[in-house]
Amino acid sequence: MKPASNPIDPEWAWAPYEPAGPDDWSLAHVAHFHRRAGFGANWQTLQESLPLSPVTLATQAVAQVESTSVESSSQALVSSILAAGGLNQLPAWWIHRLLEGSATLREKMTIFWHGHFATSGAKVRDPQLLLRQNRLLREHALGDFRLMVHEVAKDPAMLMYLDSDSNRKVHPNENFARELMELFTLGEGRYTEQDIRELARCFTGWEVRRNEYRFNPYQHDDGTKRVFDQRGPFGGEEGVDIVLERDDCPRFITSKLVRYFVADEGLSGDDLIEPLTIEFRENGLHIAPIVQRILSSNLFYSEHARARKFRSPIEFAVGFLRTLDGSTNLIAFSNSLKDLGQLLFFPPNVKGWNGGREWINSSTLLARANMMHELLSRSETRFGGGALLEYCESNGWHESGEMIERLSTLLLALPLNSEAAAELTQLLESGTGDPEKRLRRALALFVSLPVYQLA
């Protein structure tokens, strides 16, 4: 990875990364890309990605569309879940898409927006509504942020979650107006309490009837409002537009994207973010160009990004299976994510998951180790459709040293230290008993190491 100046030069940071030689573009680099732009990649994908340039990789990622076979199997699975009224099975449906899908960046962005526009099944108990919102977020995940906000503003699940599904002019509900500015577009402290009250008046008359958005003109306050520096008889759509026009909006969103893709900490300065903020605004708040630029930049491949992310539970668990072509019992797998702190469709509150360093503590570390031990102990957990030992041999990994080296390249953001490598080697080469079980125990130890918790 190329070194960067300190403080980081914004012009250098967001310029395209151009490897100068073989040491600047290796399997470690493309594995880093796939961990951040998706959930990791298998050995074959790494080999296929290596001849491509960083810009080509990012360009291809934002252009990915889901295969018809995955869409078909996904629809069949969710139909059976909905027929049974299975709110609690929705996480397993999404896990299926994460493991089997080909549009991995879009899925990763859908999770990003799920945490951004957080809505929980703990309160919205209708799986149809949660699924509809999920599809909305996936459709716009890399599209027009302005359009996504407008649609989220009228999304029944969101309005019900924020108690704004019956907004009367005599008692405007301020919840959605507050969260629209604080959590969805501008960030905390970028508005006043007066702005909230005036913006809430814009949304009066917005209701949910029979699980559909409806505008009730008899409950709408058609008087003059003053939102920031603008005055007029604004309705809800105009209120959303006024907020989206604020300069704080592109800065807030690009900052979150940089934190999501590059590093959890230390890169929040406005000067560093400014080039992306300007581009996001000039591109009409279209998301794909910004994500593409981040994923192909000098900063993304620099020491400021490498191993500077704490793996979320989804990245930890889904990334493990995807990287090794794994499959398992989806219901048990998705339920175990609750113990790790990230059950999909059930974010903890309206702020979503805080992420970063908060993913890791003594309890979650133990839960992660237990989950992997249980996952690798299940007979239905397969790799490439069969045994783990057969999978390794099918990839040409026959010796313990070779296995550890390949697994390190696939799974780790930093090299494995010699002490851990020696312990794994001893576990693989010593003792008797079933070699498949011995290999699985070694793999469980491998992904419980502190270095695997980083991405």
Image: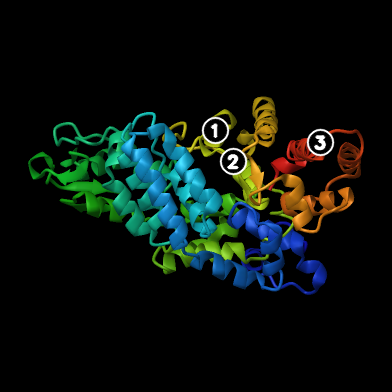
Which amino acid, by three-letter code, is at mark 1? Answer: Ala
Count neighbours of disc 3 (C-alpha within 10 A) and say few if under 14, some if 14 to 19, many if 20 or more. few
What is the C-alpha distance between the residues marked 3 and 1?
A: 25 Å
Q: Is residue 359 visible?
A: yes
Residue type at tag 3: Asp
Q: Position of residue 7 (x, y in %)?
A: 70, 57
| Residue 386 x, y percent position in the rendering | 67, 47
Few, some or many C-alpha atoms within 10 Å of disc 1 (few <14, some 14-19, many ≥20)?
A: few
Q: Is 188 placed left or right of 261 in the picture? A: left
Going by the numbered disc 2, the residue's amino acid type is Thr
Discs 3, 1 touching: Cβ within 8 Å: no
Cβ–Cβ below 8 Å for labels 1 and 2? yes
Q: Residue 123's quadrant in the figure?
A: top left
Q: Which residue is mark 1?
A: 332
Q: In front of the other: label 2 or label 3?
A: 3
Identify which residue, 383 or 250, lies in the foreground: 383
- Is 353 positioned to the left or the right of 430 in the image? left
Residue 255 seen anywhere in this rendered image of the structure: no
Check the image and report above or below for 191 versus 67: above
The residue carrying pointer 2 sits among few (fewer than 14), some (14 to 19) or many (20 or more) residues within 10 Å by Cα, namely some
Q: Residue 117, position in %: x, y?
A: 40, 44
Which one is in front, 384 or 27? 384
Rendered image: mark on residue 328 = 2
The structure residue drawn at horizontal position 73% and vertical position 40%, both measured from the top left corner, is 447
Q: Secondary structure at mark 3?
A: loop
Residue annotated with mark 3: 434
The alpha-carbon separation of the residues under discs 2 and 3 comes to 21 Å
Q: Secondary structure at mark 2?
A: loop
SS at badge 1? helix
Residue furthest to the top in view is 363
Q: Is residue 301 above or below residue 239?
A: below
